[in-house]
Image (cartoon, rainbow, N blue to C red):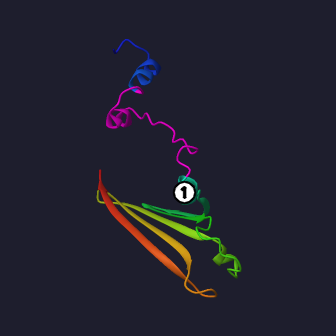
Amino acid sequence: MSNLPYEMIRHIISYHDNPDIRRWFGIYGRIDKEKFSILKTITRTANPDFHHAHQGYLYQQYILPNLYDLTGRGSNKLKHDYLEMKICDYNNKVYYNFGIYRLKPDTIKNYYWQCLQYSFILEH
């Protein structure tokens, strides 16, 4: 099989039933958004808002479209939800910290920020 062109090998592996083997070769199929219409209600595309890079440290903030269609949210800062990403490389480990900040309705005129934090460490 080593004599075959790489494109042909990828094409053959794309028919394999095991997703781990396809993933190993970097072969991912597109998700049919028409077939899985529920995805339109839960996925949002983030737009970069702020970026800061320092030696061994990266901070990125993204603006997310509102999950809830809340009218009259007030100031411009309240018109969006946010995703914060912090990555640090230290002692052969990469530290990841993600924060999702979502403005949710509490009552008709009051809102509160729901904060979800995810952290994990990967070793080199």
Secondary structure, magenta segment, majority class: loop
The residue at 31%/55% (across/down) is: 122
Vertical side of 14 occupied by 40: above or below: below
The residue at 54%/73% (across/down) is: 102
Query: Quick check: 45 left or right of 6?
Result: right
- In magenta stretch: residue 29: yes
Looking at the picture, tell me which residue is in the foreground, 91 or 2: 2
Q: Position of residue 87 (x, y in %)?
A: 42, 61
Vertical side of 81 occupied by 91: above or below: above
The residue under label 1 is 43
- In magenta stretch: residue 70: no
Looking at the picture, tell me which residue is in the foreground, 69 or 85: 69
Q: Residues within 10 Å of mark 1 (few under 14, many from 20)?
A: few
> In the picture, which quadrant includes the N terminus?
top left
Vertical side of 100 occupied by 92: above or below: above
Query: Quick check: 29 left or right of 90?
Result: right
Q: Position of residue 21 (x, y in %)?
A: 33, 33
Q: Kindly identify the amino acid type of the residue bearing the numbered disc 1.
A: Thr
Secondary element type, mark 1: loop
Q: Which residues are magenta?
A: 14-37
The residue at 57%/59% (across/down) is: 41
The residue at 42%/35% (across/down) is: 26
Vertical side of 86 occupied by 17: above or below: above
Looking at the picture, tell me which residue is in the foreground, 18 or 45: 18
